[in-house]
Amino acid sequence: MGRASAIPPEVLAGACLAAILLAACVVLVAIVRAWAAHARVRARALRAVRGEREAVALLRARGYAIVEAQATAVLPVRVDGETFLAGLRADYVVSKNGARFVAEVKTGELAPSVATAATRRQLLEYEIAFDVDGVLLVDAERGRVHAIVFPTLGAARRARRVRRFSA
């Protein structure tokens, strides 16, 4: 192996400059990626806020009254005999003709559909945790309000009521 002094100074200077330029490029790429990620998050948040505003007008136009915004509930879950309390927050609790509903607002291509597992699970959780007559999925961007029903959940509730009253 040769000595460092055997390398001409111009080559060392060129190698150092190349290393500095490469490091600068790596930092620049990281900055651009972080900025792009931040821009996507901000755009998504703005879209959601706009969707919630549009949803209020849409729900009111369909005869629903806003009872509560950012409504909260607690869902108790038993894990190995110990109770865990899961806090939930729904976009709205609304009422119409004496019935109360949780209204969840979704925007985008996938979220406003029960075919999306996360949305379906969220609505099922709301149906169980909130003291309401049903759940609504509001697709604000398309101007749609969907009444969501989990038939087996309703059957299980009816069976529990029958057992409770017949005992």
Image (cartoon, rainbow, N blue to C red):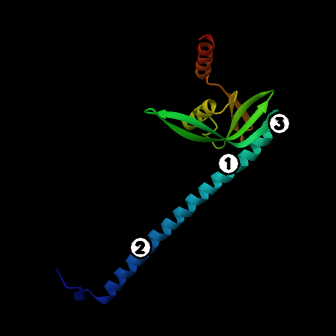
User: What's the residue type where badge 1 is placed?
Assistant: Ala
Instruction: Say few, some or many: other residues with alpha carbon within 10 Å of mark 2 (under 14 / 14 to 19 / 20 or more).
Output: few
Q: Which residue is pictured at 45% across the width and 32% down the height?
A: 81
| Front residue of 24 and 96 | 96
- For the residue labelled by badge 3, is the local secondary structure a helix, a strand or a loop? helix
The C terminus - image quarter: top right
Question: Farthest top residue?
Answer: 166
Q: Hey, which quadrant is residue 86 in on the image?
A: top right
Which of pointers 1 and 2 indicates the residue nearer the eye? 1
The image shows residue 81, relative to residue 51, as above or below, that is: above
Per the image, the residue denoted by label 3 is 61
Per the image, the residue denoted by label 2 is 22
Instruction: Say few, some or many: other residues with alpha carbon within 10 Å of mark 3 (under 14 / 14 to 19 / 20 or more).
Output: few
| Front residue of 79 and 124 | 79
Instruction: Say few, some or many: other residues with alpha carbon within 10 Å of mark 1 (under 14 / 14 to 19 / 20 or more).
Output: some
| Cα gap from disc 2 to disc 3, whole angstroms | 58 Å
The image shows residue 152, relative to residue 50, as above or below, that is: above
Of labels 3 and 1, earlier in sequence is: 1
Q: Which residue is pictured at 69% across the width and 30% down the height?
A: 132
Per the image, the residue denoted by label 1 is 48
Q: Which residue is pictured at 76% across the width and 44% down the height?
A: 54
Can see residue 116? no
User: What's the residue type where badge 3 is placed?
Assistant: Ala
Of labels 2 and 3, earlier in sequence is: 2
User: What's the residue type where badge 2 is placed?
Assistant: Leu
Place of residue 131 in the rendered image (x, y in percent of width and height, measured from the top left): 67, 31
